[in-house]
Image: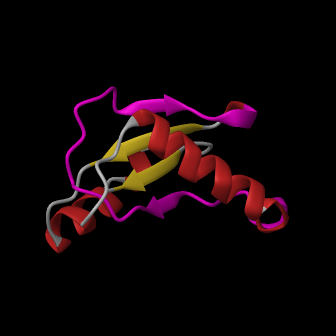
Amino acid sequence: MTLVATPSLVRAKLGELLRHDAELLRHDAELRVVALQADPVWRHDPSLDLPAGRRAVVRSCVSTLAVRDALSALGEVPDRDVLVLL
């Protein structure tokens, strides 16, 4: 069974990642992409505010091709934002 992604879940998972990997982020501020195993359905605002002035940009990816398409558009995501793939 996969999770249904909600804004609260995405914020919690990214908050956990950002806290857990704070040392990594200090050395790699360019962390830009996170994949979450969840149903590829997102009916919410595509951007979510995160701590420290960062934002999450959420993309539903129903296939490998959709993941590749989202990654190819990474240049359109502002530098401090994190692309979240479902």
Q: Residue 4: x, y in percent?
A: 28, 49
Q: Residue 71: x, y in percent?
A: 34, 62
Q: Nearer the viewer, residue 9 or 79?
A: 9
x 65%, y 59%: residue: 17
Q: State which region is magenta.
A: 25-52
Q: Quadrant of the C terminus?
A: bottom left
In this rendering, the answer to whether 71 lies above or below 50 is below
Q: Is residue 6 visible?
A: yes
Colour setting: secondary structure
Return the residue found at the far front.
1
Say whether residue 52 is left or right of residue 13.
right
Place residue 57 in its image quadrant: top left
x 35%, y 65%: residue: 37
Q: Is residue 37 highlighted in magenta?
A: yes
Q: Is residue 78 visible?
A: no
Q: Is residue 22 highlighted in magenta?
A: no
